[in-house]
Image (cartoon, rainbow, N blue to C red):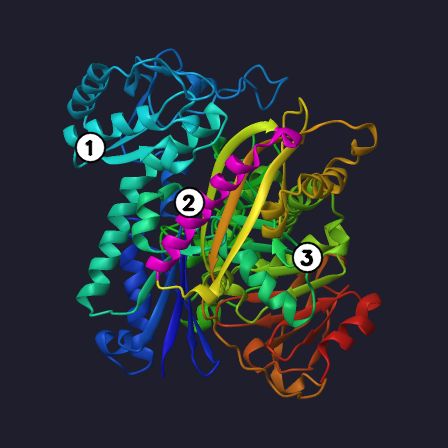
Amino acid sequence: MKYKIGIDVGGTFTDFLLAAEDGSSEIYKVLSTPEDPSIGTMRGIAEMAERHGLTLEDFLARVTTIVHGTTVTTNAVLTMRGATTGLITTQGVRDALEMRRGIREEQYNNRYTNVEPVVPRYLRRPVRGRLDYAGQEIEPLNLDDVRAACELFRKEGVEAVAICFMNSFANPEHEEAAARLVAELMPEAYLSVSTRVLPSIRFYDRVSTTCLNAYVGPILRRYLQSLVKKLDAANYRGVLLIMQSNGGVTTPDNAIANAATTLLSGPAGGPVAGIAYGEVQNQRDLITVDMGGTSFDAALVKDGEPLVTTEGEIDRRRIALPMLNVVTIGAGGGSIGWIDEGGLLRMGPQSAGSSPGPACYGLGGELPTCTDADLILGYLSPEFFAGGRMPLYPDKAREAIKRHVAGPLGYSVEEAAAGMYRVINVNMAAAVREVSVAQGVDPRDFPLVVAGGAGPNHACMIALELEIPLLLVPRESSIFCAAGMLMSDLQHDFVRTYPCLLQDVDLKRFRALVAEMRDEGLKLLRAEGIPPERVRVVYSLDLRYLRQYHEVNVEVSAEEIERGDLEAMAARFHPEHNRLFGYELSDVGTPVELINIRVKTIGITDKPRFAPEPYFGADPSSAKKGERPAYVPAADEFQTVPVYDGALLKHGMRIQGPAIIEQVNTSTFVTPEYHLVVDRYGTMTIYLPVKEDEVLRRIGK
């Protein structure tokens, strides 16, 4: 039997999906090891081998592909524990990294402080040399300034060097000359060059992205080299792929060279998996939500494609590479409940993580978390958490909530736990609004695809807050991103800046830029072993009306590019602008301006097959485990609620809320407002009664 493994390293747990070639799959979870995530990764693989009665070496001999997503780079930025980084930039603009776009996020908050740059000012070294907007040399590059910068960097223990010059997107010669000298003088340093990372207009976007790439590069390099070394020691001979923020995968070498492409590596698997599970029920428009131990991620999928942005941020720092438009907040099972200075109950963004973890884990944690509240409210079983392998301690949860929340507020422990539950649900609903309403869509029209170990316990309350009538909880929801990684294709994104009016485009130059990017992408895919028949190329343009500030990305066809059909390209722009902003100006003849040309090359990979189940009928009694008291928010009281074994729920079985569905790695709380039915792939469809006819028609027999 051959296998593929999807791995998602999170802040609290490392998730694994083992997919066999016969369509069967297995779920694994181990506690993450922040000091070296590869330890937790190998521990999980060893657990798989043990369950199959094989040595690690014999088991890995049967594994053809490992697809790995990681939060190593994300956490390095969030905790400011990246590499010591130096920046070489044009004289006079070294403070652009700190000034950003000169816009304060909270305009009326005089106490709002700027975010700390990843490169301190004394390591941002200016050099003489200048190009104009068209890439023509105004002043030669002064290599003595570059040498002086390297001398300082060596003295200060700099591990990574970023190079970003004004207008270099139009001519990379100065940056390449500086890069050659830095590589000669500092051969061990990680080198990040803006024209290799992001050769596009807008200096702050480019310098921020280039510096972030340098800041996390050595961290990712050490981690992946450690992982590869451990896999080599176990004689692994299969393929290792790394998840990127754009929803595609790449090789470890490409990931190391472009480390910033992994800054949202873990969450990017969610929308990809959501598409696969939605298609089973012909749902091409959906919202994916993933509540893990530390964070909550929400993303929008429209017409079977996840939304992509090039204006992303990580902890208020701009990252302008293409990435899935995932909104992430600090809300997870480990989110800590606390009382602010105004006496209000807050949840997160601080998290107890995997060590010491929630108080109920009994691992030394003393602060009350979302998991502690869920346990007190009856949604979790103290004896069945992690399938019984990890007992929970209600007395420790009660003590933590009493000391830090209930006591200060004058509530009972149960009232405080219910308050914690409500607050974190409202926080997560706000994130879903941001990813839907902010994109001009009504969340009530989009099914909620629920993931994460903690997500199904909170999903119904999030949906009620947003009036969403339909939810999908896949059987693999607890390791959703790991599943999505096995469903991802190889993907490479390229961009070239060509600012001009669309009507004035030089078609010869336009086609040459497109061909340059396409050929580079095809070369990478060939090196990764993708045959030509499994290659797809996507072309798009960043367009805007003349003198606008923001662009709209519009996909165009290869035929339109070949014909030079500029009118057809503009015709695609107007309705998209209208959808996003509520108006368009085609009728008044406002010129359209081209800013960037983008090319995406995709290498289609083999996806795991999941075997469908036969129809078992509507009666769920064979899956019922018993009953227990649980808090029902609509009634604001504890009620006796039936508990079902999720592993025994089969295709067609129907349940009316309130109910609790227990699985080894997650638990689902169905509120009284919703009903539940299981589809042929084990996905639990949770719906309001008004949707029953539609849902049962989609589920079928």
Q: Is residue 666 above or below residue 328?
A: below
Q: Nearer the viewer, residue 87 or 270?
A: 87
Residue where numbered disc 1 is placed? 183
Mark 3 lies on residue: 303
Tag 2's secondary structure?
helix
How far, Cα to Cα, is label 3 from label 1?
A: 46 Å
Q: Which residues are magenta?
A: 501-528
- Callout 1, which amino acid? Ala
The stretch drawn in magenta includes residue 511: yes
Q: Residue at x 29, y 29 (%)?
A: 176
For residue 63, say whether it is visible: yes
> How far separated are the C-alphas under marks 2 and 3?
25 Å
Q: Is residue 264 visible?
A: no
The reply, left or right, for residue 71 in relation to residue 61 is right
Q: Is residue 564 left or right of residue 479?
A: right
Residue located beneath label 2 in the image: 261
Say which quadrant the N terminus sits in.
Answer: bottom left
